[in-house]
Every structure is written in structure tokens, then in C-alpha cells.
Amino acid sequence: MSPPQIVESAENSVVAAKLSEVPPNSGKIFKFGNKPGILVHTAPGEFKAFSAVCTHLECIVQYRDDTKQIWCACHNGQYNLSGKNIGGPPPRPLEEYKVNTRGDDVVVTRG
């Protein structure tokens, strides 16, 4: 007996947030198909977005303003604001997404 297959969403872009929902130096988890993403407002007008799934054991990461890093609480995994793994056990960087603003919407697109 096999577990049910989870079909990956074909969705290529999503409105991750309204500009007013993510002030500078903050982050927000958003839904991208059936997986979570993380949107980080790094500086006024500058956004970064990544898969929010840690590359170690698939826990959900979060943004930490005190360290200006993306952090996984499960095993203290650390990523810089380019998504590169810089500390702890994560074996590879987070998958990066493209970010654009359209009016008040922050739109995130895969590859």
C-alpha cells in the first residue's frame, strides 16, 4: 500500500501580499499552490521571495529581523537574504522566486 500522491500545483504566480502587509525589515509566509513561500521586505521597495521549506528536513522557515536572516527553528538552520545556506545543517540554498509589484500587490513568480 502506497501513500496518496500529492500533485504539485501548476500555479506559476501568486499575489503573496499587499504592500501594506509587509513593512520594511519584515517577512510573511504565503501559500504558493500546495507549498509555503516566504516573502521578505528587505529595504523600502525591495523584496525577496523563496520557498519557505527548509532544505534540511522540510520544516517551515521564518524571517528574523534581529539577525536579518531566514531561520529554521527545527535545527537552527540559517540562510542569508539571497537564500544561501550559511549555518546549521541545511545542505543547499532555498529555491528563489521572482518578485514584482503591481499596484498594491506583491506578485511572486516561479523561475
Image (spheres, rainbow, N blue to C red):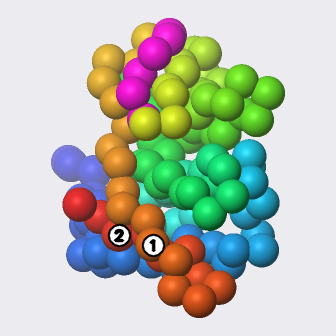
Residue 99 at x, y percent in the picture: 44, 65
Q: Which residue is mark 2?
A: 109
In the picture shown, does residue 107 fall above or below 42?
A: below
Whether residue 72 is in magenta: the answer is: no
* Residue 32 against residue 10 in the figure, above or below: above
Residue type pointed to by label 2: Thr
Residue 97 found in image quarter:
bottom left
The residue that appears at 72% across and 33% down in the rendered structure is: 64
Q: Picture coordinates of residue 93 (x, y %)?
A: 34, 30
Q: Secondary structure at mark 2?
A: strand
Question: Alpha-carbon neighbours of circle 2 within 10 Å: few (<14), some, or many (≥20)?
Answer: some
Q: Amino acid at mark 1?
A: Asn
- Number of marks present in the image shown: 2
Q: CA distance from mark 1 to mark 2?
A: 8 Å
Residue lying farthest to the top in this orientation: 88
**Image location (x, y in percent) of residue 27:** 68, 51
**Residue 12 or 53: which is nearer the viewer?**
12
Residue extending furthest toward the left? 1
Task: Label 1: state its secondary structure.
Answer: strand
Can residue 58 be spotted in the picture?
Answer: no
Specify the quadrant that holds the C terminus: bottom left
Choose mark 1 or mark 2, whichever is in front.
Answer: 1
Residue toward you, 61 or 68 = 68
Mark 1 Cα within 10 Å, few/some/many (few <14, many 20+)? some
Q: Are marks 1 and 2 in contact (CB under 8 Å)?
A: yes
Q: Residue at x 73, y 63 (%)?
A: 22
Q: How far from the left and from the top, in percent, is residue 98?
A: 36, 62
Q: In the rendered image, which residue does mark 1 sit on?
A: 100
Q: Which sits earlier in the primary sequence, circle 1 or circle 2? A: 1
Q: Please give the range of residues in magenta.
A: 83-88
Q: Is residue 3 left or right of residue 62?
A: left
